[in-house]
Amino acid sequence: MIFRKPRQQPSKPAVAAHNRRVVVDHNVCYFCGACVAVCPPDSIFLENTHLFIDDETCTRCERCTDMCPVHALKMVEVGEWKLPTMSS
Ligand code: SF4
Ligand code: SF4
């Protein structure tokens, strides 16, 4: 007899995951590390005063965006987010 682990349903549609990414507002983030602690695949890296998110391993679960006390993390559509320009 073969036993198989029941397949888990993804919380978000896979196709949507590829169209979105988490971005951080470094003007707001105060590097508390709360988002790092809740990220299941360890996709967030905090280095001194810089926060990096690994898009390759991020599953777009949005735990970090929900957790951030100052709303410095945001899930955006790919292409929606642009670097601030000198005039903005
Ligand atoms: S939880 Fe928010 S303020 Fe804290 S390190 Fe993460 S992005 Fe920055
Ligand atoms: S969306 Fe989820 S997997 Fe991606 S960085 Fe945030 S907590 Fe980690």
Image (spheres, grey):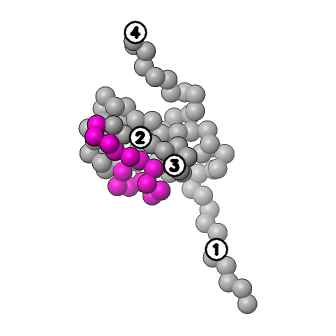
The numbered mark, 3 or 1, whose residue comes first in the sequence reads 1
- Single out the mark in the foreground, 2 or 3: 2
Q: Is residue 61 visible?
A: yes
Q: Position of residue 22 (x, y in %)?
A: 48, 39
The numbered mark, 1 or 4, whose residue comes first in the sequence reads 1
- Single out the mark in the foreground, 3 or 1: 3
Task: Calculate the distance from the C-alpha at mark 1 to the C-alpha at mark 4.
Answer: 53 Å
Task: Calculate the distance from the C-alpha at mark 2 to the C-alpha at mark 3.
Answer: 11 Å
Using a 10 Å C-alpha cutoff, classify the residue at mark 4 as few (fewer than 14 neighbours), some (14 to 19) or many (20 or more).
Answer: few
For the C terminus, the image quarter is top left
Residue on which the image places disc 3? 58
Q: Secondary structure at mark 4?
A: loop
Residue on which the image places disc 4? 87
Residue on which the image places disc 2? 52
Question: Measured along the vertical axis of the image, is residue 68 above or below residue 83?
Answer: below
Residue 24 in which image quadrant: top left
Give the residue type that dot 2 points to: Phe
